Image (tube, rainbow, N blue to C red):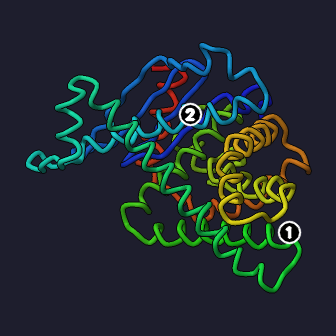
Amino acid sequence: MNKEKLGKVGGQAVIEGVMMQSQNYRAIAVRKSDGEIEVKKERIKSWVKDKKIDKIPFLRGAFILIDTMISGMNSLNFSSSFFLEEEEEEDAIDRFLKKVFKDKANDAIVAVSLIISLLLSIGIFVLIPTFLGGLFAKVINNHIILNLIEGAIRIAILISYMALVSLNSDIKRVFQYHGAEHKSIYCYENDLELTVENARKFGRLHPRCGTNFLFIVMFTSIILFSFFGWPNPLLRITIRIVCIPIVAGIAYEIIKFLGKYNNILSKIVAYPGMMMQKITTKEPDDEQLEVALTALKAALNEK
């Protein structure tokens, strides 16, 4: 494996396609209904990089996460646009945003989607776990154990959610493209020609996957929250929300570590997230690998 290439590219599965990103370019490849592959390529413009925030350890994690979520939603919007029926009517929210923001409507839609996603995430992964964990406080008087229970509930919710959505046929195809993304990146990192035949031989689990990031966030939060004891519910929830950027910052540095090194320690740290990827990735077919490789080549400015 070429150590210089570790961490140089990353990606995301989208609807019937893959988004790949190098240091300079972002490319999305989508297999349209007629079988053709549509490619959108753009030079990366990131306010995080422009302001040099990506050079500040621990602080950069939260900002990079927000930047990644925005680009991810834009990629999903692009891929979904090929499969929306022409006669499908816009909902009231979309019509309102387009009327108010006009040519900036797409940015507004992404912003609203991001806010809704963050609120749902806080509700599911902060409010519910800390409420359920609080039920154990009646019989357990150890704040470390209570934080462990809360963290275990949070992880259980995450795994259950991923397992449930994986039963959907459309999501399963997204997870196949997720596997294709990983195999393609492995092919690049091992200095092999970017062909379907070469990519096919690699595994679909990758240590720098977003699934790994989610698990590391969960685990980091257990340790960090333990330092604050087990205060009343309102203060507990406030602490967890305020600490989200700190948790994201620490988790990002751990993911950076996994990207730079391939030793026993990095494998141990990556192992739980790798096992979770057995849910979030599925074995791709050759056509899906072709799409992922097309996106990767474009992101590397090879086409």
In the picture, which quadrant includes the N terminus? top right
Q: Residues within 10 Å of mark 1 (few under 14, many from 20)?
A: some
Q: Position of residue 106 (x, y in %)?
A: 30, 32
Q: Is residue 274 above or below residue 301?
A: below
Q: Is residue 102 above or below residue 80?
A: above
Note whether residue 301 is visible: no
Q: Nearer the viewer, residue 44 or 66?
A: 66
Q: Position of residue 255 (x, y in %)?
A: 75, 41
Q: Position of residue 18 (x, y in %)?
A: 45, 41
Q: Is residue 58 left or right of residue 189?
A: right
Q: Which mark is residue 194?
A: 2
In the picture, which quadrant includes the C terminus? top left
* Amino acid bearing label 1: His
Q: Secondary structure at mark 2?
A: loop
Task: Report the residue at 65% width, 61% height from top.
Answer: 234
Q: Which residue carries the number 1 mark?
A: 143
Task: Report the residue at 62% width, 18% height from top.
Answer: 49
Q: Is residue 47 left or right of residue 91?
A: right
Q: How many marks?
A: 2
Q: In the picture, residue 148 is in which quadrant?
A: bottom right
Mark pair 2, 1: CA separation: 51 Å
Q: In the picture, residue 74 is in which quadrant?
A: top left
Q: Is residue 70 above or below residue 214?
A: above
Q: Nearer the viewer, residue 6 or 252?
A: 252
Q: Nearer the viewer, residue 63 or 292?
A: 63
Task: Report the residue at 55% width, 63% height from top.
Answer: 124
Task: Report the residue at 89% width, 74% height from top.
Answer: 142
Note whether residue 271 is visible: yes
Callout 2–callout 1 Cβ contact below 8 Å? no
* Amino acid bearing label 2: Leu
Q: Is residue 228 left or right of residue 73?
A: right
